[in-house]
Image (cartoon, coloured by chain):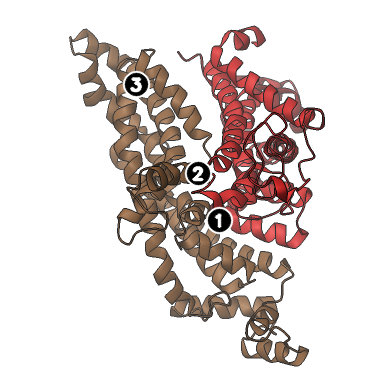
Amino acid sequence: MRRYILHRALMFVLVLAGVSILSFALIGLFGRDPAEIIARRTNIHATYEQIEAVRQSMGLDKPLPVRYFAWLSGLFRGNVGISIYSYEPIMQDLGKVMPVSLALVGLAMAWVMVISVPVSLLCALRPGGAADHLVRAASVVGLSFPTFWLGFLLLIAFAVKTPIFTVLPAPGLKGYILPSFALAVPVISGFIRVFRASLLKEMNSDYADYARARGLGRGRILTRHALRNALPPVVTMFCQYLGYLIAGGAVVENVFTLSGLGTYLVGCVAAADSTAVATCAVIVAAIFVLANLLGDLLNRLLCPWMVRE
Amino acid sequence: MVKRTLRNPQAVIGLLLILAVLSAAALAPLLAPHDPNAADLTKKYLAPCADYPLGADELGRCELSRLLYGARASLGISLPVLLILAVLGLFLGTLSACGGQAMDHVLTFICDTFIAFPQLVIAIAVIGILGAGVRSVIFAIVVAMWAWFARMVRSYAALEMGKDYVLAARLAGCGTIKLILLHLIPNILPQFLVYLSTGVASSILMVSGFAFLGLGLPLETAEWGGMLSSARGTLYSHPEMLIYPGVCILIAAAGFNLFGEALRDLLEGEP
């Protein structure tokens, strides 16, 4: 166990370091001049001298490694400076966009839980039945849905034809209902496929046969015995998506004109803002790695007998 | 195997959808009634008629022609992406599984880093570095997706490496390269094909997602995601312009997903 914790902690630090270096390298290769972008924002005919002045005042004249370490020490002090994209402190920007993304992902994951758990159980109760076939066909279609198109369909159906919702996001939780559902549909589909397969695998095992021989009904075996054993692959997948969707929502945010982390990231990359991109990328990667770790730990708690060292 | 695949209805439907999209892409110049980029403002939002079967878009371009050429853009990017990812994934994955512990640790770390990195940032940056065009979109998607493929191959290969036939081959004096090429790859190929088929579907979705955000392809290109993006202003007046391109993306992605998932069921011998 100690070895495991050490290994995971080391990987965590290494991956975050890798991600931040990769951000700086990518933006460094990008070929857009951030100083020019800032200078041209206030004055479209900025002269060479004005651009150079901006470069020096922002510290953009220093070589990339120096800027990287300046950013890194800033990160530990909790102050990573001003974003070139928004011209506001990066931390303050993140304070605005993170709640949007977290609400979106949180609600999407709630949709996933509420819909896919009962549906998967229903499928596993009668494999090969009509409901099972229907759900399996629907899940392949769901996997193939472009989320942004689904967003438009939802808007056409529920904001244009029958105006329950508004095209521009309503304040509060109501504005997140449609976008989170659009984001959730492919996840729900993938989730049902994995959960169903895992449940059936458990239902075909020896202990399920034994329980059947003892006279227990299929539904009872499913919920009392198979469910818990079938959880590990599903927990892993759930946590993977949790980390993946945080920054993966840019397209859906775009459709519903929400300003979350995905949209902010797109803007920052376009403005060649290496410090903001690196900050966001580190946060996203940290959430991703921690979510995966959480899944791993949950599995160890749920099914300690399944853990392989 | 081929016979069993053809007897599986899901696989057949998937194959038919794939063939439909492939032939739309291949025969677009023959099937399209008009030049996909010929704008004619007098025909703006023309209702469907004999000459324009699906009507015309906001610049008076033939919607059907643009949809057909859209299949070219989508597959023209996704199929090369798939080829590159297949070779790269097999090479790096088997290298990681058979190339010794140090190699495995380094490759796993690089994969983990790329997987944890936001894909969109990679894509925008790569397209920004190389400039807009089909080639940079291909490169961007490869850079964004390679780590998943390498990791998948590695996990399959690591499972196979523990089996007896690998030991037997080793005992018979088989070298590492020969072992990988002649024994390991043929054994992981079926599962890998499943992953590739569903990988094309994700690549199709990714291409259209990028085009929707205005990344990669020139704006006037007939591409489904780009068409959705330029039709978004017509949410109230002409919602059908928002329907057609999406249906095409759905058909293309569903074809590859259906085929891949059916193949997986056949391989696993599942009901």
Q: Secondary structure at mark 1?
A: loop
Q: Is residue A171 above or below residue A43?
A: above
How far apart marks 1 and 2 lie (CA) works out to 17 Å
Task: Say which amino acid is labelled 3.
Answer: Cys
* Picture residue at 76% right of the left edge, 89% below the top: A47
Q: Position of residue A214 (x, y in %)?
A: 18, 10
Frontmost residue, B57 versus A117: B57
Chain B visual colour: red
Question: Is B23 or B261 nearer to us in this picture?
Answer: B23
> In the picture provided, is A197 more to the left or to the right than B162?
left
Residue at numbered disc 2: A147
- Residue topped by disc 1: B118
The amino acid type of the residue labelled 1 equals: Pro
Q: Local crowd at mark 3 within 10 Å, few (<14), some, or many (≥20)? A: many
Q: Earlier in the sequence, mark 3 or mark 2?
A: 3
Tell which subunit mark 3 falls on: A
Looking at the picture, tell me which residue is in the foreground, A167 or B21. A167
Q: Residue at x 34, y 21 (%)?
A: A123
Q: Label 2 is placed on what type of residue?
A: Thr
Labelled disc at residue B6: none
- Mark 2 Cα shell of 10 Å, populated few (<14), some (14-19), many (≥20): many
Q: Secondary structure at mark 2?
A: helix
The residue that mark 3 highlights is A123
Label the brown chain with its letter.
A
